[in-house]
Image (tube, grey):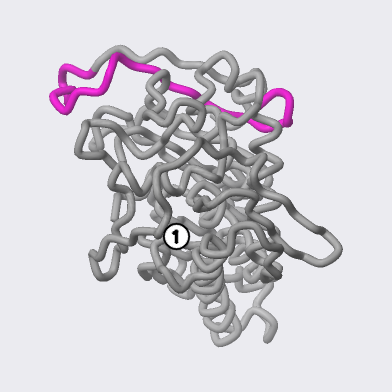
Amino acid sequence: MHSPMPSLQPCPKRASDDIVRTAVRMGTFVTIHVVGPAAAHKSEAHSPMLREEAVEGAFAWFDRVEECCTRFDSGSEVMRLAAQAGVPVPVSTLLYQAVQFALAVAEESGGAFDPTVGHAMETRGFNREYRSGRQIRSALDRGAPVSYRDVRLDPERKTITLLRPLVIDLGAVAKGLAVDLAARELSPFENFAINAGGDLYLGGRNPDSEPWSIGIRHPRSDADLIEAVRVSNRAVCTSGDYEKRSADGGHHILDPRTGASANGVASVTVIAPTAMLADALATAAFVLGPAEGIQLFDRLGVNGLIFSVPSFSTDCVAPDLPVLTRYATQAMHEYL
């Protein structure tokens, strides 16, 4: 598991009737914070019992999404799909929506984002189940290159057909989807925060009745922040090359067009209406690089920050941090 970044900044005036719960879900720490109602607005609808039930319901969405979308469980729905290439397979609404969204982002990004990189991720060692430590290997052989164009959807029958043997990786979609579903569960309480290992949704206001403050990690020093943003009713997601490393020195964000780790960017943070959108676009922009990444954000009406630095070095720690080049959308200043 990796440390969650961006992170919620401290709320010193947190009320005693706030609810804060943390649990391990989808291979990372998930923290849910529901702000207690002001005394003038307390009612049965906002009772501690109802808020606790909503928090449990929010956590349950992470389990449901994982059951459908993880490639780290040979019995998951997406891995059962991988074993049935060439035939239309009826799938759950959750899996269908996740794949449909992933394919749309793949098309929009010209293949810089591509959910069919699952087997390539396996071969690079990103296939270890977080609870047991077991390596999950599909039965596929390294064959001809595959792409998102090898996946067909039937919207009427809700089926997915894999035109070639392949493994769909929804790592840049599923966690965001779970955050969005959890946020929907908590929406009656207006003021809440969900932090799922760096994928966040911030509802309403923090305990000080101000926008939530989010710190973004310096990509070369986990003890330092490179930026902070203030948001309400928005998702914030970051992709960085520092979270997971492979044995060959690469990282877990692959350029699907080359099969190698993307190396033009160190971290990307996206602010968007939904976590699924922010999560996927952060990955897409990481692969595209700064110029095309910012163009993608502008085209889709989201805001973001992209930081590029010299090539990765484990020796790059404070006080000798490398100089970063910062790229931002024009409207990003509204959140700083």
Tell me the residue at 71%/41% (across/down).
104
- Compared to 24, does 60 lie above or below? below
Mark 1: secondary structure: loop
Query: How many numbered discs, if any?
Result: 1
Q: Quadrant of residue 321?
A: top left
Closer-to-camera residue (317/120): 120
Point out residue 186 in the picture as x, y percentages from the top left corner.
62, 69
Residue 174 against residue 6 in the figure, above or below: below
Q: Main secondary structure of the magenta part?
A: loop
| Residue 278 within the segment the image draws in magenta | no
- Residue located at (25% from left, 15% from top): 322
Residue receiving disc 1 = 71
Q: Is residue 318 left or right of residue 290?
A: left
From the viewer's side, name the closer residue of 207 and 290. 290
- Residue at 51% x, 59% y: name it: 194
For the residue marked with disc 1, what is the amino acid? Arg
Quadrant including the N terminus = bottom left
Q: Residue at x 32, y 30 (%)?
A: 218
Q: Residues within 10 Å of mark 1 (few under 14, many from 20)?
A: many
Q: Going by the image, does 200 lie left or right of 122? A: right
Percent coordinates x, y for residue 60 in the rendering: 53, 76
Q: Position of residue 256 (x, y in %)?
A: 49, 32
Could you say which is closer to the camera, residue 28 or residue 100?
A: 100
The stretch in magenta equals: 297-321
